[in-house]
Each structure stands twice: as structure tokens, then as C-alpha cells.
Amino acid sequence: MIKISKTELSTLNEKIYRFRNGIEKSKHQDLNYFVTQLSGFQRQYKKAGLERSFAQNIFTFAESLRKMGIPDCPGIIYSYLMKMPFLKSNVKEFYARKALDYAYEKGDSIHILARLVDLEKLYLQTGQKHRRKNVLIAQEQELVRMCSNFREAKQNFRTFSRVNNKKQRYEMELAKTRVDIAKIIMKEEPQKAGRILMKARKTFVRTKRQKEVEFVDMMLSQLKTKNSS
């Protein structure tokens, strides 16, 4: 950490204020420029040992942009915040929930899924089994909705980065999500787990994923053994 003077800190805060002001007044957002600027400011605040101050500043910025109805930028900031390594898990969860809520608000399926995956990973890391299960179920529901009407879902993708927009990719993701749900519930709800696994198996068979088929068959065999004992 490098100590900076009050004058340097004031200059840094002034720069980010001008950036905020420019974004709020602009009618058209260059999202690549927006992300590049955020990264640049984070490096400067980090160098000064003021990352927490930076996080507070840009969260306030995101809330302001959201109230003003400026698209995309609030979601980018929320997602940016939840990936900051120094934050505690409950703070990361708060930002992830903010990002998820914003994606639902915009009907943006690709970012709904991305934020659900972020939450699922967080709950896996922190051992929050029940919350992880609920997030996986929400992920399954969103994937079912996407795959059943993929053309409409694809029109609502709001991202400046390249994404895999093939329906088969999301069908595979749905099948894998179902396997993850079955793993969690197979002890308490073996029959439901079996039904979920059979749905996943159909997708794996249709797409010729032999390893995945064999894994599901192994899980189904374990369920049969438990039910017969």
C-alpha cells in the first residue's frame, strides 16, 4: 500500500466524480469503455489502499444509475463488486443478489443464469446446502424457460461480451443442473431425485454424452439399492 496525500486523494475522487457525471449525462453507453474505466479506477484506489472506499463509491453510483433508468451499467457494477476478493461472503452475496434482481428486472436470461451460478458457487464454498439447492432449482426453472422458448430468450440477451448462443449449450447446462440437484436431495427425496435424473439422462442420451449417461446410471443404481434396502 502506498500512502497518498489528501490532495492526491481529492484528485482521485474528482476523477471518479467526473466519470460518474459523464455516464449519467450520456445517452449512449460504450460498455467496453465503462468496464475499462472501472478497472483503471480500482487499480488506483487499490494502490492507495482504498479499495473499500472504491467499492462504496461505485455501489452508490450503481444505485443512482438504476434510479435514473440507465441500462446495463448498474448490473455491470454489481457483478464487478461481488468479484472483489477482499469482501466477506455475506457482502458478496448482497451484491450478487443485487445483480440477480437487476437481471430479473430486465428479463435478461443470460445474466440471470450467470448470477445464479455465482450464488451457487458462493453457497458451495460456504457450505450453505439449503440455499445452494434453492439457487439450483431457480437455475433449472430459468433454463427450462429459456430452452422452451429460446428465440425469445436470445433476443433479451444484454451483454457486450461474446456468449455461446446455441440452444444445445443451455440444454446441456440444464441437464447438469438437474444432476447437481439430484445429488443434494437423493438422501431425503430419493424418488424425486430419480425423476430428475431421468430427465437429465434423456438429454445426455440424445446428445450422445456417454460418460454423463454412465454417471447418471451409477446414481440411479445407488438410488435403487437404497430403496430396496
Image (spheres, rainbow, N blue to C red):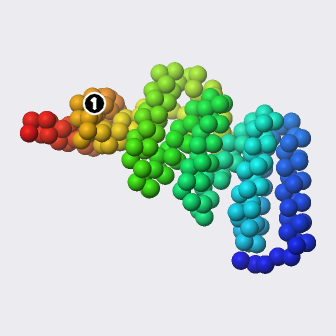
Res 173 → quadrant? top left
- Residue 169 appears in the figure: no
Question: Which residue is nearer to you in this view: 213 or 174?
Answer: 174
Which percent across, then down, holds residue 136?
43, 39
Residue 156 lies, with reference to residue 220, above or below; the image says above
Which percent across, then down, holds residue 10?
89, 66
> Is 204 situated left or right of 226 in this image?
right
Q: Quadrant of the C terminus?
A: top left
**Residue pictured at 42% horizontal, 34% vertical:** 137
> Is 112 situated left or right of 27 in this image?
left
**Residue pictured at 71% horizontal, 77% vertical:** 1
Res 111 → quadrant? top right
Which percent across, then down, holds residue 34?
77, 49
Question: Count the marks: how many?
Answer: 1
Residue, disc 1: 192
- Residue 219 appears in the figure: yes
**Residue pictured at 51% horizontal, 41% vertical:** 116
Q: Secondary structure at mark 1?
A: helix
Q: Amino acid at mark 1?
A: Lys
> Is 53 situated left or right of 100 in this image?
right
Which percent across, then down, holds residue 121?
47, 50
**Residue pictured at 66% horizontal, 52% vertical:** 80
Q: Residue furthest left?
A: 229
